[in-house]
């Protein structure tokens, strides 16, 4: 994925984002007024989407030249907001089933056509930047989804006009919500891949000449875990589990397993402080992987902050290197 200095035509991209921000703010005001006046849920959904996109472009401008990790964090936030928008609209559609009001088809069609022109223009300007990092991709997806949504609202207006019933409007609002959920999930997965890639790079940097091949890392983790189970010396057992945690923390299930092993050992040795620390760390693992906040080099025990990135001690490096040689 491109670093900030690798984005082609950065100045043009910034200018396009400012234009898109202005267009979306203006269309939000137009559509929310028209949606309320015409009692159209699909227009209101599109208006909320315009507001979300304006925020999207504003965030993108704010972190445009930031490091990849910060751009990925921003993309995660925007993905969550896209999915939240989808859930809100789905809830409104279900509520509107019982309300039974029929929207004004003429107003729906006219405003949706205006919105389509605006969104096609923005999408056309952003098309050249659609293959960038997760943040750039989220911007493109929002613009593309808006254009698709406008076509759907126009179709809903035709349906309402032809049937004199509200169900076409509700159906389109639900479709737009589903599209927002799908796109949010796509951006979230893209951003998480970027964060995992950064974590793997950081791990490789701290390990200097040691390989970060995923298959070898997983095998090395299993070797350290087996050695820890067989070890009868308690301090050495903890060191092996700490080494296993460092090797496995870039992999969700291995990260979980490493803390389970530590929790079991803490319970067997009746170490209450360590057991509580492991329970706390187990609760943080899903959030760490979701947000890409993995404290690389952290041994995972309660005597070290769960958020601290550490230089791997020589003793643990040696244990990891020995286990890696056995795994190869």
Image (cartoon, grey):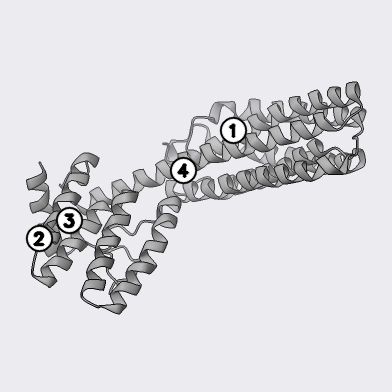
Query: What's the distance in space between the residues labelled 1 and 4, CA to CA?
Result: 14 Å
Residue position for label 1: 140
SS at badge 4:
helix
Badge 1: residue crowd in 10 Å (few <14, some 14–19, many ≥20): many
Query: What's the distance in space between the residues labelled 1 and 3, CA to CA?
Result: 44 Å
102 or 57, which is in the foreground? 102
Indicate which disc residue 191 carries. Answer: 4
Q: Is 224 displayed left or right of 299 in the figure?
A: left
Q: Indicate the quadrant where residue 288 lies.
A: bottom left
Residue 282 spot, x, y in % from top left:
37, 62
Q: Can see residue 208?
A: no
Residue 296 spot, x, y in % from top left:
30, 57
**How many circles with numbers are drawn on the protein?**
4
Badge 4: residue crowd in 10 Å (few <14, some 14–19, many ≥20): many
Ranked by sequence position, the earlier of labels 4 and 2 is 4
Residue position for label 3: 225
Query: What's the distance in space between the residues labelled 4 and 2, CA to CA?
Result: 39 Å
Q: Is 46 displayed left or right of 4 in the figure?
A: right
SS at badge 2:
helix
Indicate which disc residue 230 carries. Answer: 2
* x 32%, y 68%: residue: 278
Residue 317 spot, x, y in % from top left:
14, 58
Closer mark to the observer between disc 4 and disc 3:
3
Q: Is 302 situated above or below 285? A: below
SS at badge 3:
helix
């Amino acid at each position: 994925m491109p670093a900030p200095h690798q984005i082609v035509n950065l100045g043009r991209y910034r200018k396009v984002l400012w234009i898109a921000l202005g267009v979306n703010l203006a269309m939000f005001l137009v559509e929310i007024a028209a949606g309320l006046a015409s009692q159209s849920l699909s227009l209101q959904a599109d208006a909320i989407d315009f507001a979300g996109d304006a925020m999207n472009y504003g965030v993108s401008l704010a972190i445009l030249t930031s490091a990849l990790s910060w751009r990925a964090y921003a993309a995660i936030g925007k993905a969550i907001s896209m999915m939240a928008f989808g859930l809100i609209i789905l809830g409104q559609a279900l509520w509107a089933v019982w309300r039974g009001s029929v929207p004004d088809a003429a107003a729906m069609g006219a405003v949706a056509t205006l919105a389509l022109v605006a969104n096609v223009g923005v999408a056309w300007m952003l098309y050249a930047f659609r293959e960038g990092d997760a943040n750039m991709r989220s911007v493109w997806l929002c613009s593309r989804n808006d254009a698709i949504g406008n076509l759907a609202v126009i179709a809903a207006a035709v349906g309402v006009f032809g049937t004199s019933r509200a169900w076409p409007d509700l159906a389109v609002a639900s479709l737009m919500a589903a599209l927002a959920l799908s796109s949010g999930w796509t951006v979230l997965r893209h951003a998480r891949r970027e964060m995992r890639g950064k974590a793997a790079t950081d791990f490789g940097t701290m390990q200097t000449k040691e390989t970060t091949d995923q298959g070898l890392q997983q095998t090395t983790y299993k070797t350290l875990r087996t050695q820890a189970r067989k070890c009868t010396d308690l301090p050495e057992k903890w060191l092996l589990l700490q080494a296993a945690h460092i090797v496995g923390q870039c992999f969700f299930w291995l990260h979980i397993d490493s803390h389970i092993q530590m929790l079991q050992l803490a319970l067997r040795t009746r170490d209450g402080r360590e057991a509580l620390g492991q329970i706390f760390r187990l609760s943080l693992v899903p959030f760490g992987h979701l947000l890409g906040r993995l404290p690389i080099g952290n041994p995972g025990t309660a005597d070290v902050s769960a958020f601290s990135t550490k230089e791997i001690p020589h003793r643990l490096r040696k244990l990891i290197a020995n286990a890696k040689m056995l795994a190869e």
